Amino acid sequence: MGFSVPPLTRGVKWLGGVTLAVSVLVPVLGQSGKSLAELLDFVPALVWSGYVWQPLTYTFHSGDPVGLLFALLMLWLLGAYLEQSWGTRRFVTFYFATSALAAVATFLVGLVARDTVWVGRYTGNWPAMAGLIAAFAVLMPNEEIFLYLFPVRARWMLPISAGITVLYMVMRGPWWAYLPELFGLGAGVLIASGAAPRNVLLRMRVWWIDRRLRRGRLRVVRGKDDKSGPFGGTGRGSDKYLH
C-alpha cells in the first residue's frame, strides 16, 4: 500500500513461524520428517481414510523454497494489514477457513478424478494466500498495491491471480496440482463478501419475510395533509399510515 509496510502482527508471526519451522524440519529430519509430512499434507484419498485434519494442516508444509519465501512475504504484507483491520481471531479463522474450503472443493473434484486429484498430494499455504488476495480485492478495491514495480488497484489482483493460476495449470501442469489455489480465491471472495453459511441463511430468512409481507399486500396510504384538511387539499400529505 504505497511504499509502506505493515508491522509483524501476532497472527502473522504465529502462522509464518510455524510454516517456516515445519517446512525446514521436514527435509532436515529425514525419515521422521517424511512421516511428519505424510501426516500434514493433504491427500484426498487419505482424508477419506480418516486423516480428516489434513485440510487444516497442509498449509504448514511447503517443499518449494522460492514459493515458501514469496508466500511468507505475502502473508506479511497482506495478512498483517487485514489482521490490523479484523483482529487476530477473525484473521486466523479466515486463514484456515479459506484453505479448508479449498481443500474440501478439491476433495469433491477428486471423487470424480480418481487417477489424478484423488491421489494427489497438496502442500503449501498458497490457497490461504489466494484467499487473502481475494479478501483484499473485495474489501479494499481502491487500495494501490505494487505488483513488482507496477502500481495496481487491489480490485485487479483477483483476476490477475486467477489468470496466473490458470496459466500455470495449462502451461506448467499438472492442472490438478493448482486446484486448491484456484478454489482458495473463490473461498476468499465468498467469505469476505459475507456469503458464509450463517449469512446466507440470514439473507434467505430476510427474503422469506419480505415475500410474506408482499403477499399481505401492504400499502402506504396518504395521511393527513400537512397544509390542508384531512385527505384533501393540494398539499403533499404525510405518507405515514401503513395498511
Image: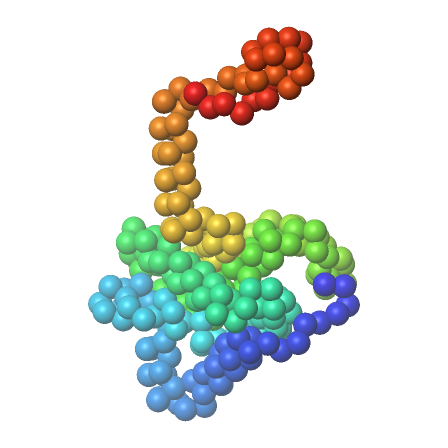
- Please identify the residue farthest to the bottom as the structure is shown: 29
Q: Residue furthest left?
A: 49
Who's the residue at 60% across and 57% down the image?
136
Residue extending farthest to the front is 229
Would residue 194 appear left or right of 227 to someone viewing this image?
A: left
Point out the image quarter for the N terminus. bottom right
Q: In x, y percent, where is residue 105? A: 37, 55
On screen, residue 109 versus residue 226, left or right, reads left
Identify the residue at horizontal 33%, vertical 67% (top origin): 43
Identify the image quadrant of the C terminus.
top left
State which quadrant residue 133 falls in.
Answer: bottom right
Q: Position of residue 103 (x, y in %)?
A: 38, 61
Give how far across and how far down residue 16 sits, in percent. Answer: 53, 78
Q: Residue at x 53, y 75 (%)?
A: 11
The one of 25 and 151 positioned closer to us in this rendering: 151
Residue 160, compared with residue 91, is above or below; it is above
Task: Identify which residue, 117 or 148, lies in the foreground.
Answer: 148
- Residue 212's x, y, as percent? 35, 28
